[in-house]
Structures are given as C-alpha cells and as structure tokens.
C-alpha cells in the first residue's frame, strides 16, 4: 500500500522516486507485478539444515550450518508479508551403525545416547537464536511412517531389487566406497589399515545381500535437471562438481543392511531381516517435516532450499534427487553448499582434541557477536580457520567501534540534546549533486555515501541469493565505514545548535547518519537479531517498520516525507556492543610457527 501511495505522490510532485529493494529486479517485485499464481508460488519457502548425527556433541561447524540456514530464512521473512510463509526445519539423525557403535562405546543404549545428544543440539540452537519452526528426530514414529511409505513407493515403481553388495563401507561417513576411493594409512604398530581417501575415516569390507536402488537409471535425468536449473546448486563451483561426477558411471546403490549387523534403524517394510540404509532414512526427514505422506506436504514441496556442508553434497545432489525422481517427485529447488571450519589449520576432531564448543563461544562473545563472526568470516567456497584472536579483533572493530561508535556519535546527548531524529535540510543537501550556493554543504563524497547506502539492500539481497552472506556483511561493514567517514568529515561536535547557520546542517548530518544506521540495523536483523533490535529500538523504529519491502532510505533526499523526522529516539540502553577484552584466556590460540 505504502508503495502505491508513494508512487502516486511521485507523479504529482515530480519528485525523484524512492529506491527500494523491489526496484532492482523482477525477483523482488512483491506487489503489483505478480500474478496471483506467482504470488502463491512465491509465498512459500521451506529451508532445511542437515539433520545432525548424535554420536558426539555439537561443534562450531554444526552451528555454522544452522546459522546459514537461519540467516537465509530470516532474510526471506523480512522481505515482506506476501513472502512471509516460511518453514525452517532442523533436527537430529539418530539411526545407523555410527550411532549404534557410539552408544556401545559410551556404555549407553542407543535411545539414551540419542535423547542426550539431541537435547544438546536443541539447547544449543535455542541459545543461538536459530529460528526453526520444526525440529525432527529420525527416531520419531511419524518419520518411520514417512520412510516406510517412501520405500513402498520406490518398490512399487520397480526401482528396488535384491542383490549381493560387496565392497567397502565407512561407518563414520555411513557410505559405500569404490576401491578407488580407499587408501591405506599406517597404523601405530607399523601395520596399515584401509581408510576413506576423502574423509580419512576407517573402512571395512562388507559382503551382504541387500536391497539395491536403480541409481544408474537416473544419470541422464539428473544431468538434465542440473543443466536446466543452473542455480540448483549454489555456489556455482559445487554445481559444476556434481555435473562432473555425473560424467562418470553411476552405479546402483545398496539401500539396506542386514538387521543382524545394523539393528538400530527402520526395518524394510515386509522384510525384518533388513534395515533401511541410514542415508535414505535421513534424507526423507525433509518430507516427514512437511507432513508426508499426507497430501499437505505438496504445499511446501519442492519450494525447498537445503543448506548443507560440502561433505554431504553427493547425498543431497545425486542420491536425494534420484530418490525423489524415482518416487515421481521434483528435486529440491535449491541446494546451498558451504565449506568447513578448521581449527589452527586442522580438521576439528575429538581425537585431535581441538573441537571448539559453540556454547562456550556464545557465552564468551555473546550470541550476536558469535553469530556475526561465523557468518562474516565463513566463506562458502573455501574452508575457514578458527582462532579466538580473530573473533575478538573482528567484533571489536566492526561491531563495537565502527557500528556502536557510529550510533553513539549520533545519539549521545552532547551532540543530539533533543534526542530526536533531526530534520533533513534540502538546501544544505540538495538532491542534485554539484549545486553551489551559500547554504549547500554536501560534498561529492556525501553523494557517494547516499548512493552506496541506497543500493545496499539490493546488493545484500543478491549476496543472500548467491549464498554469499559474508559478502552481504562485508558490504554493510563497508557502508558503516563510509558513514563514519561522513560524520568525521563534517564533525557535528564542532557545530552549534544555537547557530542559525550551523543548526540545519548539523540536523542534516545527524539525519543522514541515522538513516544509514536504520538501513544497517534493518539489514543486520537476519544475522544479529538482538543487536539489530537494540539499534532499531534506539532509533525509535517500530516493529512494523523493519521489513525489507518497505525499506525507503533517506526519503527527504528524494523529496518525500520521512516518517522518522522529528520523532523521539528510543530509550538509551547502553553500549550497542561492549568491546571484548583482548587479554582474556583463549580457547584457541592463533597457530604461529
Ligand atoms: N547426518 C548427516 C546429515 C544428514 S542430512 C539428511 C551429517 N551429519 S553431521 O552431523 O556429520 O553434519 C551435519 C552438518 O554439519 C553437515 O552440513 C556438515 O557439513 C556440517 N559440518 C560438520 N563439520 C563441519 C565443519 N568443521 N565446518 C562446517 N560445517 C561442518 O552429515
């Protein structure tokens, strides 16, 4: 509605049009231009994280997977009421040999281990502000129903047959490996043992009669799907890798294990001597959550975005779409892939004793601080290295000093004694650059700032779409620096509210800086929800004014009324982000050799 009235106003007054997110591409037209059908399709979005193994406590890599999904989902919700129907699921993967073995090693029953560790994940996600709408455990009865139904569909379509499978099995990765993917690793006694070339985890030789899925039939359909949906797997290098895998032969896949060997799982319907392969079981969780096999699931499928780590790409980009196609369903709409966190250059592992506990980090750096760190530093295309000094440095410089300092400079009583959003003076800052006149105070760099912040929401949206959230945060951070430069350049602390010459310009400088802060606060909501709330509340921005669809930056500059002008700021609630103490004892020190 607001948009329509603004446009009418533009027609009447001849003022320049306000740039909003929706102006920058058809993807973001959420109102007039969409047909009812597009609306309905666009209205639903279903985000998923992988479901997490319960053989060990969560680490920062798991939290990172969940945070990426959370930020994508929150960003999507902010795009406005018409696209706000989102669903976001996460959960725990509780069946399989790996869990069966971990429980035995811990002297627990599998159920005890699953309950304990699943609870741990749930608590972590709650503390970290993961805004999931669903949490699934694969040991739930509803999931068994979904998996067995899915199995029945594959069977009825002639895609399962019985055969002897002989080859390597890696219990840690829960996957079968061809000879070429196995190598030998020297053991402690000068012997050697076989391990997976990719993960380094031990493998064992298995020969069993199993149910086998006709995966080989799906090589061409998968290639067609990927070629006609170039954005199906993002970032692009992962899409490319999957296509390369599909250039090679795609053997059929064993999808069950002998129950005498693997009892902790879902039995094959009608054949209790076999247990369903844990990856088939796990992948179906995405359907269970949305009500499968009841027809209600169709309103969410395939409007699905899976967020996954690179280690489980083959399962999500080959096996899962093949199972779905086999069952007569569409593959998921998007698969977003991220890389891994290492610690001091090494893979995180219990045996190396370098696992970083995410709850300790959340306590130490605050929830918003640690969320910001992981999402700002995590690059989906490459592995990233963790150490504590990096966190402290980044948070102090970007959240405490740059953003917090900027807010403080514009709201401190000393500079803004009336504690309001001051008026913008169009003669001091005319919308046309290059004008000269006695009251014109804006300089070329100030126009550059306005242009950067005006295009920031669109830039951020594009980065989210390309799964480059770190770039979105980099762009925000760069605009924060530019805004600090603007304030520094015009030194409002040297201007005098009592002077009729200074006052309109002083108000304008603060108005522009507050407008920039309002945009930053709005855009940071998906990543640092509490900090953004604190910032926007301090600016006096109400809950209904925080959506991306209605993010009109600096309307006065474009000749429109600004609802914030003259409004009282919200109450002062202390530092936005208190600086972290550099001398704290480290959890993980930087690796220096
Ligand atoms: N249970 C399977 C997923 C089944 S989904 C149908 C699984 N679980 S996992 O617990 O091993 O991994 C869950 C997610 O955490 C994966 O996306 C994985 O890539 C991610 N990570 C595990 N270690 C990681 C890092 N060191 N860094 C970043 N992400 C990491 O796989």
Image: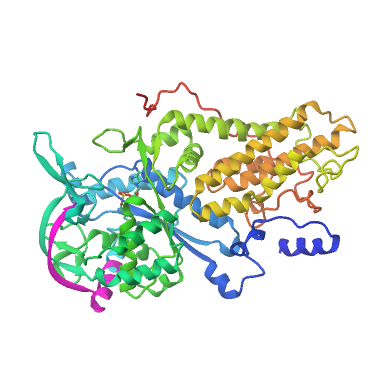
When asked about the image quadrant of residue 277, the answer is bottom left
Quadrant in which the N terminus is drawn: bottom right
| Nearest the eye: 450 or 55 | 450
Which residue is most to the top?
Answer: 583
Is residue 564 highlighted in magenta?
A: no
| Nearest the eye: 301 or 339 | 339
Give the left or right position of residue 377, taking residue 545 as reference. Answer: left
Which colour style is shown?
rainbow
Q: In the image, residue 300 lies at what x, y percent? A: 45, 68
Q: Give the extent of the magenta segment.
A: 146-171
Quadrant in which the C terminus is drawn: top left
Is residue 148 highlighted in magenta?
A: yes
Identified at 63% across, 44% down, the residue is 520
Give the left or right position of residue 215, taking residue 222 as reference. Answer: left
Q: In the image, residue 13 lies at what x, y percent? A: 85, 60
Give the vertical position of 205 relative to 184 (above or below): below
| Nearest the eye: 498 or 463 | 463
When asked about the image quadrant of residue 575, the answer is top right
């Amino acid at each position: 509605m607001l948009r329509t009235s603004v446009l009418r106003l533009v027609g009447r007054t001849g003022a320049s049009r306000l740039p909003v997110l929706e102006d920058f591409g058809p993807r973001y037209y959420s109102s007039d231009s969409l047909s009812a059908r597009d609306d309905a399709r666009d209205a639903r979005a279903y985000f998923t994280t992988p479901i997490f193994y319960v053989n060990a406590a969560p680490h920062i890599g798991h939290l990172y997977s969940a945070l990426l999904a959370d930020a994508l989902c929150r960003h999507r919700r902010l795009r406005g009421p018409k696209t706000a129907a989102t669903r976001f699921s996460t959960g725990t993967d509780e069946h399989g040999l790996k869990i069966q073995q971990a429980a035995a090693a811990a002297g627990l029953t599998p159920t005890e281990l699953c309950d304990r560790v699943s609870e741990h994940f749930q608590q972590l996600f709650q503390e970290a502000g993961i805004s999931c709408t669903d949490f699934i455990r694969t040991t739930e009865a509803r999931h068994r129903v979904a998996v067995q139904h899915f199995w029945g569909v594959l069977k009825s379509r002639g895609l399962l047959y019985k055969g002897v499978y002989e080859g390597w099995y890696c219990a840690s990765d829960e996957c079968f490996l061809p000879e070429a993917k196995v190598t030998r690793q020297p053991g402690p006694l000068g012997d050697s043992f076989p391990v997976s070339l990719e993960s380094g985890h031990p493998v064992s030789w298995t020969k069993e009669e199993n149910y086998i899925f006709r995966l080989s039939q799906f090589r061409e359909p998968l290639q067609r799907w990927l070629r006609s949906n170039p954005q199906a797997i993002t970032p692009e290098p992962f899409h490319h890798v999957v296509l390369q895998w599909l250039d090679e032969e795609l053997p059929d896949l064993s999808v069950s294990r002998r129950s005498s060997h693997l009892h902790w799982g879902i039995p094959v319907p009608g054949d209790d001597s076999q247990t369903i392969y844990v990856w088939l079981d796990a992948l179906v969780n995405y359907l269970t959550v949305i009500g499968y096999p009841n027809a209600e699931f169709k309103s969410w499928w395939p409007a699905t975005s899976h967020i996954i780590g690179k280690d489980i790409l083959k399962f999500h980009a080959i096996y899962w779409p093949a199972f779905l196609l086999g069952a007569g369903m569409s593959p998921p709409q998007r698969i977003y892939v991220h890389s891994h966190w290492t610690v001091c250059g090494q893979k995180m592992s219990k045996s190396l004793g370098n696992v970083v506990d995410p709850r300790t980090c959340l306590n130490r750096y605050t929830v918003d601080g640690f969320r910001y760190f992981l999402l700002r530093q995590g690059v989906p295309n490459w592995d990233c290295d963790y150490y504590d000094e990096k966190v402290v440095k980044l948070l102090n410089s970007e959240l405490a000093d740059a953003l917090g300092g900027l807010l403080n400079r514009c709201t401190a009583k000393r500079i803004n004694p009336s504690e309001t959003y001051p008026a913008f003076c169009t003669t001091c800052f005319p919308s046309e650059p290059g004008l000269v006149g006695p009251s014109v105070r804006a300089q070329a760099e100030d126009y550059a700032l306005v242009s950067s912040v005006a295009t920031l929401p669109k830039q951020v949206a594009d980065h989210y779409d390309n799964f480059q959230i770190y770039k979105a945060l980099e762009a925000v951070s760069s605009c924060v620096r530019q805004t600090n430069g603007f304030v520094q350049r015009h030194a409002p602390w040297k201007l005098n509210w009592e002077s009729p010459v200074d006052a309109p310009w002083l108000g304008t400088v603060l108005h522009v800086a507050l407008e920039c802060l309002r945009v930053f606060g709005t855009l940071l909501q998906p990543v640092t929800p509490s900090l953004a709330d604190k910032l926007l509340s301090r600016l006096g921005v109400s809950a209904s004014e925080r959506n991306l669809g209605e993010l009109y930056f600096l309307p006065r500059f474009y000749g429109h009324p600004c609802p914030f002008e003259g409004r009282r700021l919200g109450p002062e609630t202390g530092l936005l982000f208190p600086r972290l103490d550099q001398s704290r004892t480290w959890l993980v020190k930087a690796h220096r050799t």
